[in-house]
Amino acid sequence: MVAHYAKEELERRADNGDGEAKMLLAIRESELREEDNSIKRRGPIQQFKHSAPTLKVIFRMRLS
């Protein structure tokens, strides 16, 4: 809800000639377009190679 009012305020300021507000709106639209394109673009499915199991070593220290 707050974001909606903030966007309306930026649009009002941009209509009144505020260059910074226009720039912020343009940046947000660009981000949304980029996000939309990345969702639509699907990369190839990667096959994971099964590698040999790794050895994990756990050290325990005791204070005496």
Image (cartoon, rainbow, N blue to C red):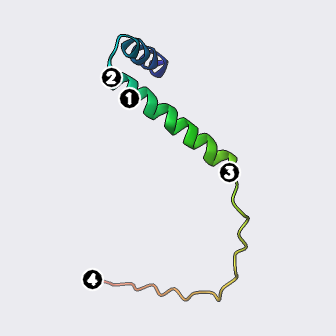
Identify residue for label 1.
23
Residue situated in front as seen by the camera: 22 or 7: 22
Identify residue for label 4.
63
Identify residue for label 2.
19
Residue 5 position in % (x across, y down): 45, 15
Mark sitting earlier along the chain (2/4): 2
Q: Which quarter of the rendered picture does the C terminus lie within?
A: bottom left
Q: Residue at x 32, y 84 (%)?
A: 62
Residue 57 position in % (x across, y down): 47, 87
Q: Badges 2 and 1: C-beta atoms under 8 Å apart?
A: yes
Q: Amino acid at mark 3?
A: Arg
Mark 1 or 3: in front is 1
Q: Amino acid at mark 4?
A: Leu
Q: Badges 1 and 4: C-beta atoms under 8 Å apart?
A: no
Element type where label 4 sits in the image: loop
Disc 1 to disc 3, how far (Cα)? 27 Å
